[in-house]
């Protein structure tokens, strides 16, 4: 067994650059790349996926032109997001991979990215589902040397780093939620003329019918100064995309009502999801406050950190938190509360999202801001 590779700073830089370049082309596809875990492996020729992670040959990636690298990474992420590994079942592997490749190659081309000569295209078939394409390819004679079927892996390469997370995690469900979040971000970015969901049956079939509260939270955080549509594409051409990313910052103030009306599960769910956003967007910063009739904090939120111990427990007054906006100057405010308390007399200039557990105040009771409702446990 090969010794596991460790992602180098150069490898991470290649992945970060690709993610940011794609932001200037498609909010939908860029969001999917944010959800993908890229790990190095020399056992793949260029790149491959086992449905959970994307494995990239670091030497090959470093040798590719930037737009070709973007195409390659997006190709594999789409395979993972659309569960092409898991959905194969007992079907013949090589023909299934060819069918799946036709699907994702059309999507990559729709993002305005170049498709290498090895990326076969069929503008009719690529708009169908992968099962339909697989059936249509029945009886075709494979040519010698055809490498289709190499990038959908039955398991991780032996030189890949160990997987993170719980063994029992539902990867297919996680990717479905990523598709929902990508759809939301795309809608908020104003890319009405570029709708990959409208063109490809594969995405239409798999997209969840309803966004859960987590996807809605991501949608809210996309409506910020770092919205995909606001990126200056001149930076990409000049190779300054990472420097541009460093200059783009978003600050979020997260407030949690500790008057006794919000249970611990709701606090953990919201703060944990905000930490997930922070992990996907390293240039986003968040500050946490607890509040009853006073504000307690600040606590810096970082991905993976333990949630600070709640403070407070008295009545409910929203005004102390809103009084902090002038000194903190956040871009957005997220307030977890049941909504029963004293509101400020005037609406703030900061975009506000009220996160309300079951049994909380009705939407029309909030004098300003957007309302997001948590589901029943």
Image (cartoon, rainbow, N blue to C red):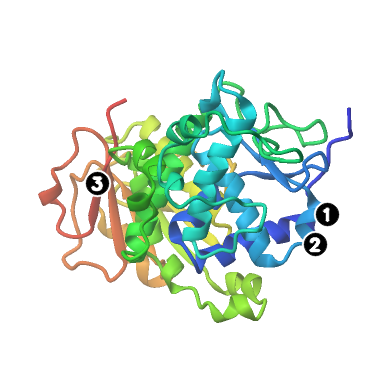
> Residue 87 location in percent, x, y?
51, 27
Q: Residue at x 53, y 45 (%)?
A: 102
For label 2, count other residues whose C-alpha is less than 10 Å away and answer few (under 14), some (14-19) or many (20+): few
Real-space Cα distance between discs 2 and 1?
A: 6 Å
Between marks 1 and 3 in the image, the one whose residue lies nearer the viewer:
1
Residue placed furthest toward the left: 364
For label 3, count other residues whose C-alpha is less than 10 Å away and answer few (under 14), some (14-19) or many (20+): many
Q: Which residue is mark 3?
A: 316
Query: Could you say which is closer to the camera, residue 128 or residue 162?
Result: 128
> Residue 324 location in percent, x, y?
37, 65
Q: Which residue is mark 2?
A: 63
Real-space Cα distance between discs 3 and 2?
A: 58 Å
Say whether marks 2 and 1 touch (CB < 8 Å): yes
Real-space Cα distance between discs 1 and 3?
A: 57 Å
> Residue 78 location in percent, x, y?
53, 45
Q: Earlier in the sequence, mark 3 or mark 2?
A: 2
């Amino acid at each position: 067994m090969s010794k596991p590779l460790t992602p180098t700073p150069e490898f991470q830089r290649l992945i970060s650059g690709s993610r940011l370049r794609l932001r200037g082309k498609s909010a939908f596809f860029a969001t999917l790349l944010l959800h993908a875990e890229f790990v190095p492996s020399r056992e793949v020729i260029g790149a491959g996926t086992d449905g959970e992670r994307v494995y990239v040959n670091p030497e090959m990636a470093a040798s590719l032109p930037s737009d070709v690298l973007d195409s390659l990474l997006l190709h594999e992420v789409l395979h993972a997001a659309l569960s092409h590994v898991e959905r194969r079942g007992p079907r013949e592997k090589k023909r299934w991979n060819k069918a799946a490749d036709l699907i994702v190659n059309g999507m990559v081309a729709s993002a305005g990215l170049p498709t290498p000569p090895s990326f076969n295209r069929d503008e009719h078939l690529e708009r169908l589902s992968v099962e339909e394409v697989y059936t249509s390819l029945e009886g075709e004679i494979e040519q010698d040397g055809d490498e289709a079927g190499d990038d959908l892996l039955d398991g991780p390469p032996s030189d890949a780093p160990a997987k993170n997370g719980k063994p029992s995690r539902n990867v297919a469900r996680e990717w479905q939620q990523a598709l929902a979040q990508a759809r939301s971000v795309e809608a908020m970015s104003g890319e009405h003329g570029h709708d990959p969901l409208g063109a490809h049956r594969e995405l239409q079939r798999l997209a969840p019918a309803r966004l859960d509260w987590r996807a809605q939270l991501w949608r809210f955080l996309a409506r910020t100064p770092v919205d995909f549509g606001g990126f200056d594409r001149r930076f990409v051409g000049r190779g300054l995309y990472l420097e541009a990313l460093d200059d783009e910052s978003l600050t979020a103030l997260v407030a949690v009502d500790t008057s006794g009306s919000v249970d611990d599960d709701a606090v953990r769910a919201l703060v944990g999801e905000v930490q997930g956003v922070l992990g996907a967007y390293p240039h986003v910063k968040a500050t946490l406050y607890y509040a009853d009739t006073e504000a307690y904090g600040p606590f810096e939120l970082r991905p993976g950190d333990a949630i600070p111990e709640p403070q407070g427990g008295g009545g409910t007054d929203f005004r102390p938190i809103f009084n902090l906006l002038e000194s903190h100057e956040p871009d957005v405010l997220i307030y977890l509360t049941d909504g029963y308390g004293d509101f400020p007399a005037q609406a703030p200039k900061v975009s506000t999202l009220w996160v309300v557990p079951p049994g909380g105040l009705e939407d029309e009771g909030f004098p300003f801001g957007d309302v997001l409702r948590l589901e029943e446990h």
